Image (spheres, rainbow, N blue to C red):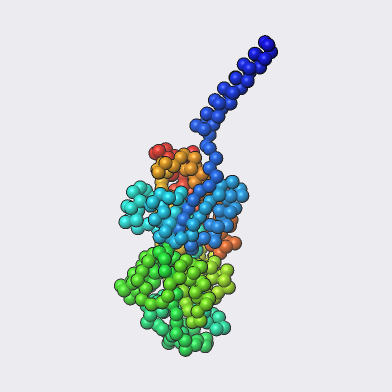
Amino acid sequence: MKMFGRLSVVVAILLVIALVVSGCGSQGQPSAVTSLTGAGATFPYPLYSKMFDTYDTVAGVRVNYNSIGSGGGIKALTDKTVDFGASDAFLNDQEEAAMGASVLHIPTCVGAVVLSYNLDGTPALKLDGTVLAGIFLGKVVKWNDPSIVALNPGLSLPDLVITVVHRSDGSGTTSIFTSYLAAVSPSWKSTVGAGKSVSWPTGVGGKGNDGVAGMISQAKGSIGYIELIYAQQSGMPFASLKNASGTFIMPSLASSAAAAAVSLPDDLRIVILNSPGADAYPISAFTWILVYKEQNYAGRTLEQAQALKKLLTWMLTDGQAINEGLSYAKLLAPAAAKALALVKSMTYGGTAIP
């Protein structure tokens, strides 16, 4: 009987120890966060899809990313229904004010918006900003227009009506493209302007980069703007563009990276369109992950904030190895350093996230 009594005491002590350890673990150690959610830009979707699959393998955290366009991602973050938003355009003052708190812009890569087209024989087309603006304004209406012919001596261009294809949804890709046109064409700037959504003078709309790519591939005589990887994956041709130095440049990893070789502000909210570099592709841009600097909101736990910080740090370090295989330029060292500094500035309850 004494032996059974001693065993009972030992069992009771072990149970108490287990409860204490369990309680300390819930307070002193992060509980396992197995998933995060994000939404936004289609521009970097091929990259994020691969990045997040890889991260799930290496870290055991599944990132559920809904590619709904930059406008949708900004709204989701504003509504606090996701851990992060994603946008190809940085927030304007009105959008940031609507957030009600400071938002960090974390660039993940440099991408190129290309002008893809559907013409018999897939000629190697050259375009400049003035002609592009004329096409998207509906003023240059045929492929054998003198302004296009002048840029393409030796090419036999057809007497074929141009069908313009643009985005139908709120889009960071649209913001990039229209901002470029506004920078190079006073007529475009004064009549249409720039933004994630604009009132298009002509053309038909497709949803997402993939939707626009699909419409171009189906419509003979069409032209539209899409992210480089969507054109490459579909085997679609794209034009070389005259850059700020007067050189016709094809979009590529090197020419996108060259566009980003500029002085960067600490908050990394910068437009690199029509960059002055001799080798820079003129419609290049950062794409950003958007997060609240203060992570203690809407019932979020410290563990969620830590998991998000770890994800962002990985995307800016080991994850950069994925970029070039999917035709996105890696962040140059100065941009990566500033981006990591922004991630480290995230707080929870006013204190740096450990």
* Residue shown at 48% from the left, 63% from the top: 43
Which percent across, then down, holds residue 291?
A: 43, 50
Answer whether residue 332 is visible to the viewer in this image.
Answer: no
Q: Is residue 333 above or below residue 157?
A: above
- Count of residue discs: 0
Task: Give whichever of 318, 208 is nearer the camera.
Answer: 208
Answer whether residue 303 is visible to the viewer in this image.
Answer: yes
Which percent across, then down, holds residue 298?
A: 40, 43
* Residue shown at 60% from the left, 19% from the top: 12
Task: Give whichever of 27, 134 is nearer the camera.
Answer: 27
Q: Is residue 25 above or below residue 3?
A: below
Which percent across, then down, holds residue 69?
A: 44, 61
* Residue shown at 56% from the left, 64% from the top: 327
Task: Give whichever of 294, 255 is nearer the camera.
Answer: 294
Task: Give whichever of 315, 201 is nearer the camera.
Answer: 201
Q: Quadrant of the N terminus?
A: top right
